[in-house]
């Protein structure tokens, strides 16, 4: 009898209320008759047991019979039925073809990647040489910072917006003050003309002059001051990268009357050129995915099952963490006529189905999730983690749920997780050579340069005013992980690994109408000890 897909075994055990050791799943899958063995194990496991162990499976397979919960001995029937959920049965190995992979990333991925195809026997579930679970749980560590779930204080009043922008200015200006000899705007007004000066300020206005120069008005807590960027300066093209509400620094010379600053240099908070990322002390991997969109008619069920089954194989034995950057479900009423493209119309049923799909992932993988704009949380950012009602639905693996954005540190490697709505803003505002949907890592670089995941208020961006600006990037992350745009892109910016992980939803009619051609069914895999990246494809 062909090998039973490990994910189907896990789902069946879960349906009966049992967790399972990985080696127990491996033993069932490798049995001569996996379906019969599975049925026997279920019948022999006491109702009050929490976990199916390898010892119980071995007793079943060695004896050829099973001890039932009441202590009697019975022989399982031939070929008992095994629940496989909705749809057509999967192929026995769970992955029809070994998914291709692209490995290696340093700087520009178009220049530094090596594409290979591994002939992995994806039907062989992983079991360590000593029969132990995946990795050593004693080495695992997850720390979450900047989680604002339950910390929201904003009421939408004017003063709340003043507070959040003041906090943004103070924190980002602090990153710039050591680089220029800045003066408050009210002090500049009293300085004489033709003197050197510098300003750290928030961009209040950008406009071009009749001569083609750029007038950038900067604001600090003391007032505003106009700064002129001449069109023939070598850094003039940086004006194309400026957004309202971001914090920058400029140096230059005051005009004769002292009423304007002629800019000689322009600085972003940026990632230091000397930045060196942290890495794990052992070989361990994390899978970074996003935009599952369960509930959509275009959710790629087969690709997800291949991914989940592959996680049970030897090729995935080093993957101990799964980070999901938002949009677990398709949601309801997110865009016009969305109801016509829904497979599940009830939002709670969408999350129930997502939880079922999550159960196919190996139980000893640590999962961290943040919400996205399709999830049932507020649209304004920062987005708190899911409500208790939704958390009670998504109980698979006891996943850690945190806000969007959050910084998740895994074995010393910090991962800034942000769903990515502001990427739309960057791409819309910037020229094509600086930011496009086809290369989503490039707008991510600009967010790192600005040290803020959503610098411009208004437009595509909805901001929830809080006492603290949770969207500031105080500490440089080792990895920056986003989703939202449904495009796969990855590369390094000043040694920070930036990954946009694509999606698990095929092109919808709405996406066709707005010319979105998604990169679906991919799973970037990061070696946390080296920050090398492998892209696995599952469709």
Image: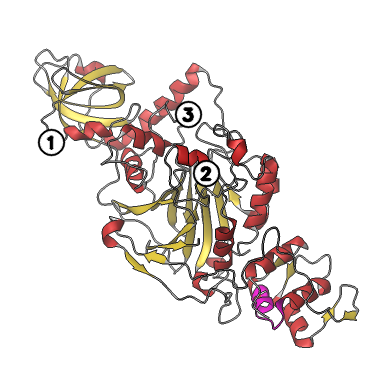
129 and 293: which is toward the camera: 293
> Dot 2 corresponds to which residue?
508
Q: Which residue is mark 1?
A: 234
Give the image location of residue 53, x and y in percent: 72, 74
Magenta region includes residue 27? yes
Marked residue nearer the N-terminal end (3 or 2): 3
Q: Check whether the beta carbons of the residues at disc 3 and disc 1 lie within 8 A of each other.
A: no
Query: What is the spatial separation of the Cα atoms under label 1 and label 2, in whole angstroms?
Result: 44 Å
Is residue 444 left or right of 55 when viewed as pictured? left
Q: Is label 3 or label 2 in front?
A: 2
Residue that badge 3 annotates: 463
Give the structural element (helix, strand or loop) at label 3: loop
User: Which of the 4 quarters of the picture holds residue 534?
Assistant: bottom left
Residue at image location 56% in from the left, 78% down from the top: 128
Give the spatial CA distance, label 3 vs label 2: 28 Å
Question: Relative to 240, does residue 14 appear above or below in the rendering?
Answer: below
Position above or below: 441 against 155: below
Q: Nearer the viewer, mark 1 or mark 2?
A: 2
Q: Is residue 169 above or below residue 274?
A: above
Point out the tag, 3 or 1, that comes first from the N-terminus: 1
**The magenta stretch spans which residues?**
24-34
**Would you say 289 lies left or right of 102 here?**
right
Image quarter (top left, top right, bottom left or bottom right) of the N terminus: bottom right
Residue at 28% across, 62% down: 112
User: In whole angstroms, how far apart are the C-alphas of marks 3 and 1?
Assistant: 34 Å
SS type, badge 1? loop
The quarter of the displayed image where residue 383 is located: top right
Image coords of residue 123 (percent x, y): 57, 75
């Amino acid at each position: 009898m062909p090998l039973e897909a490990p994910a189907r075994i896990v789902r069946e055990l879960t349906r009966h209320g049992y967790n399972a050791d990985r080696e127990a799943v491996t033993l069932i899958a490798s049995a001569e008759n996996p379906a019969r063995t599975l049925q026997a194990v279920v019948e022999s496991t006491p109702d009050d047991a929490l976990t199916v162990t390898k010892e119980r499976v071995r007793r079943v397979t060695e004896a050829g019979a099973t001890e039932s919960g009441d202590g009697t001995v019975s022989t399982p029937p031939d070929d008992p039925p095994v629940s496989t959920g909705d749809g057509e049965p999967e192929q026995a190995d769970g992955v029809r073809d070994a998914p291709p992979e692209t490995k290696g990333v340093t700087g520009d991925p178009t220049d530094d990647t090596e594409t290979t195809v591994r002939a992995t026997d994806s039907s062989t579930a992983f079991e360590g040489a000593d029969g132990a679970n995946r990795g050593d749980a004693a080495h695992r560590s997850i720390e979450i910072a900047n989680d604002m779930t339950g910390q929201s204080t904003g009421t939408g009043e004017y003063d709340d917006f003043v507070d959040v922008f003041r906090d943004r200015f103070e924190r980002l200006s602090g990153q710039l003050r050591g680089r220029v000899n800045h003066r408050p705007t009210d002090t500049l007004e009293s300085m004489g003309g033709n003197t050197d000066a510098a300003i750290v300020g928030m961009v209040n206005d950008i406009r071009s002059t009749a001569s083609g120069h750029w007038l950038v008005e900067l604001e600090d807590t003391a007032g505003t001051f106009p700064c002129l960027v001449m069109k023939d300066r070598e850094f003039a093209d940086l004006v194309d990268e400026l957004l309202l509400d971001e914090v920058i620094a400029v140096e230059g010379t005051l005009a004769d009357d002292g009423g304007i600053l002629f800019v000689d240099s322009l600085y972003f908070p940026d990632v230091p050129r000397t930045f060196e990322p942290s890495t794990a002390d052992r070989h361990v991997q994390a899978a970074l995915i996003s935009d599952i969109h369960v509930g959509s008619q275009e959710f790629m069920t087969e690709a997800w099952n291949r991914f989940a089954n592959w996680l049970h194989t030897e090729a995935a034995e080093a993957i101990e963490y799964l980070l999901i950057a938002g949009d677990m479900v398709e949601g309801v009423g997110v865009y016009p006529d969305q109801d016509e493209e829904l497979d599940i119309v009830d939002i709670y049923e969408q999350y129930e189905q997502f939880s079922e799909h999550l159960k196919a992932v190996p139980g000893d993988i640590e999962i961290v999730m943040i919400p996205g704009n399709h999830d049932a949380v507020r649209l304004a950012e920062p987005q708190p983690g899911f409500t208790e009602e939704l958390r009670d639905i998504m109980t698979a693996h006891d996943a850690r749920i945190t806000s969007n954005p959050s910084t998740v540190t895994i074995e010393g490697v910090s991962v800034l997780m942000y769903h990515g709505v502001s990427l739309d803003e960057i791409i819309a505002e910037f020229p094509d050579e600086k930011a496009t949907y086809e290369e989503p890592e490039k707008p991510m670089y600009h967010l790192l340069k600005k040290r803020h995941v959503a610098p411009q208020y208004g437009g595509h961006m909805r901001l929830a005013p809080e006492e603290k600006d949770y969207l500031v990037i105080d500490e440089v992350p080792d990895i920056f992980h986003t989703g939202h745009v449904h495009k796969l892109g990855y590369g390094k910016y000043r040694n920070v690994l930036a990954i946009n992980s694509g999606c698990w939803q095929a092109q919808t009619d709405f996406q066709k109408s707005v010319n979105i051609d998604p990169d679906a069914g991919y799973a970037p895999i990061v070696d946390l000890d080296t920050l090398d990246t492998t892209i696995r494809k599952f469709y």
